[in-house]
Amino acid sequence: MKTFGNKVREARNLLGMNQAELGEIIGVSSRSIFGWESGNSRPRAKMLQKLAQALNVSSEYLINDDIDDPTYGIEREPYVEKTREMYGSKAAREINFLMERNAALFAGGEIPQEMKDEYFEAVMAAYLECKEQARLKYGHKK
């Protein structure tokens, strides 16, 4: 089982980057990268997303020690990030949970990625419409 720090170090090395180069790409110091890799700290949600993108892995892979597949959940990340920007971290967790549970529908079959993307876009649109209607009715901004 790999830890967050191990996964960051391994992905960075696979890309041939040193800590300073990775830090420059995502806008943090090499000291921050060292802290993450050594297990002394972890990035906040927004920085975690930048880190995952720079390393070409999913943020779920990085934070969950039980996940061994670097691409696990990567197709959901743009939707989760858009939701985070619009409605905050709680909504991002909700849409991720919803999409993760819906992804189980694809298990055991060969469905083209285009069809999966269309499905996730429809789920996302429905979720965002519900959030907007709630905001209009109850006055919540996020």
Image (cartoon, rainbow, N blue to C red):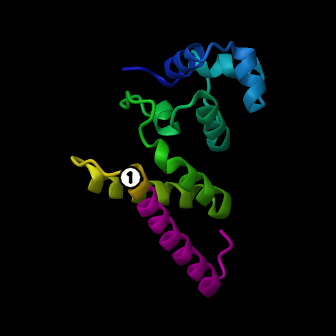
Residue situated in front as seen by the camera: 76 or 46: 76
Q: Residue at x 27, y 56 (%)?
A: 105
**Residue labelled with disc 1:** 100
Q: Is residue 42 above or below residue 115?
A: above
111 or 64, nearer to the observer: 111
Give how far across and how far down residue 141 sits, in percent: 68, 73
Q: Quick one: 57 or 95, which is closer to the camera?
A: 57
Our reading of the magenta stretch's main secondary structure is helix
Residue 49 lies in the magenta-colored region: no
Residue closest to the far bottom = 137
Label count reads 1
Residue 77, x across and y down, in percent: 53, 47
Q: Say which residue appears at 59% left-offset and 55% top-offset.
A: 89
* 129 with respect to 1 (left or right): right
Q: Tell me where residue 54 appears, x and y as whole percent.
A: 64, 30
Circle 1 residues within 10 Å: few <14, some 14–19, many ≥20: few
Q: In the image, is residue 3 above or below residue 130?
A: above
Task: Kindly identify the amino acid type of the residue bearing the numbered disc 1.
Answer: Glu
Find residue 82 and report its image quarter.
bottom right
**Could you tell me which quadrant the N terminus lies in?**
top left
Left or right, 36 with respect to 104, comes to right
Q: Which quadrant of the rendered structure holds the C terminus?
A: bottom right
Res 49 → quadrant:
top right
The quadrant where residue 44 appears: top right
Which residue shows up at 52% across the image and 70% down it?
125
Residue 131 highlighted magenta (yes or no): yes
Residue span colored magenta: 117-142
Q: Residue at left 69%, top 15%?
A: 19
Disc 1 element: helix
In x, y percent, where is residue 38? 58, 15
